[in-house]
Image (cartoon, grey):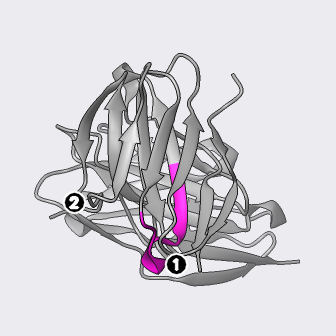
């Protein structure tokens, strides 16, 4: 069990550029979650997958955001036409379906939009 | 809508002193309750959780929390703080009937004096 990993750990981009983050969950976990955390706040739920199916999306997930989990393993989160307000820590978590309340978090990807 | 408040943004205690971090929630029914800890550069780690039953729950690293329904509170305690406990602590709730959408509080930053 190597834990949840995220790549990259840090990303600096200019406003208007597209960025993509990757999350590799714990191997046997079939649920995968994305959260956003801004400075001084707790994580905010964005979306989650059960295997490859995206089952819930928060209204925070604007149409510039898209998440995929094509083979039910790793997931990507893409932000198109980044804005300064997108600057945040993007956290990924995974869990087993039967114990979905026990979510294991990755270290996060810190995005800075200049 | 669910909400979680953590009244203390920052707490400083001396090593060896006792600790209590406050958490209050607003929800129509009793949700599932959690405490997470986040150290710099690390993912969130689950300290403990409450689903039902005994209102005093034990967690990892010597932490415990007490659920008080009448006060809608779930305060975290530790009898003797260690320097390594310095971190950000987040209280979270999830509806008992639909657990994916965690709601986190804003966090309490704990500093430990030697």
Give the crowd class for mark 2: few <14, some 14-19, many >=20 residues within 10 Å: few
**Which of the two residues, A68 or B94, is positioned nearer the viewer here?**
A68
Q: Is residue A86 left or right of residue B70?
A: right
Q: Is residue B7 left or right of residue B70?
A: right
Q: Residue A82: say if magenta.
A: yes
Q: Is residue B101 visible?
A: yes
Q: Residue A48: say if magenta.
A: no
Tell me what residue is drawn at x 46 percent, y 68 percent.
Answer: A82
The total of numbered circles placed on residues is: 2
Give the residue pinned by disc 2: A59
Residue A34: give x, y in percent of width and height. Answer: 43, 47
Tell me what residue is drawn at x 34 percent, y 32 percent.
Answer: A49
Instruction: Tell me the quadrant of the picture where the N terminus of chain A can be found.
Output: top right
Vertical arrangement, residue A59 with respect to residue B62, above or below: below
* Magenta part of the chain: A81-91
Instruction: Tell me the quadrant of the picture where the C terminus of chain A can be found.
Output: bottom right
Residue A72: give x, y in percent of width and height. Answer: 43, 21
| Extreme residue in the left direction | B28
> Residue A40 got which mark?
1
Snapshot quadrant of residue B104: bottom left
């Amino acid at each position: 069990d190597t834990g949840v990993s995220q790549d990259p750990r840090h990303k600096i981009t200019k406003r208007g550029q597209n960025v993509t983050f990757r999350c590799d969950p714990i191997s046997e976990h079939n649920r995968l979650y994305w959260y956003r955390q801004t400075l001084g706040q707790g994580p905010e739920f964005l979306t989650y997958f059960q295997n490859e199916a995206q089952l819930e999306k928060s209204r925070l997930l604007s149409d510039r955001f898209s998440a995929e989990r094509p083979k039910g393993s790793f997931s990507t989160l893409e932000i198109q036409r980044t804005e300064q307000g997108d600057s945040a820590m993007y956290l990924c978590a995974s869990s087993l379906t039967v114990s979905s309340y026990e979510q294991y978090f990755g270290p996060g990807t810190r995005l800075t939009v200049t | 809508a669910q909400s979680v408040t953590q009244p203390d943004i920052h707490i400083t205690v001396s090593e060896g002193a006792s600790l209590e971090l406050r958490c209050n929630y607003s929800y129509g029914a009793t949700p599932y309750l959690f405490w997470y800890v986040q150290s710099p550069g690390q993912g969130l780690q689950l300290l403990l959780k409450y689903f039902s039953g005994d209102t005093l729950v034990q967690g990892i690293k010597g932490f415990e929390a007490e659920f008080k329904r009448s006060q809608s509170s779930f305060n975290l305690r530790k009898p003797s703080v260690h320097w390594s406990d310095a971190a950000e602590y987040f209280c979270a709730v999830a509806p008992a009937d639909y657990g994916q959408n965690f709601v986190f509080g804003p966090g309490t930053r704990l500093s430990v004096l030697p």
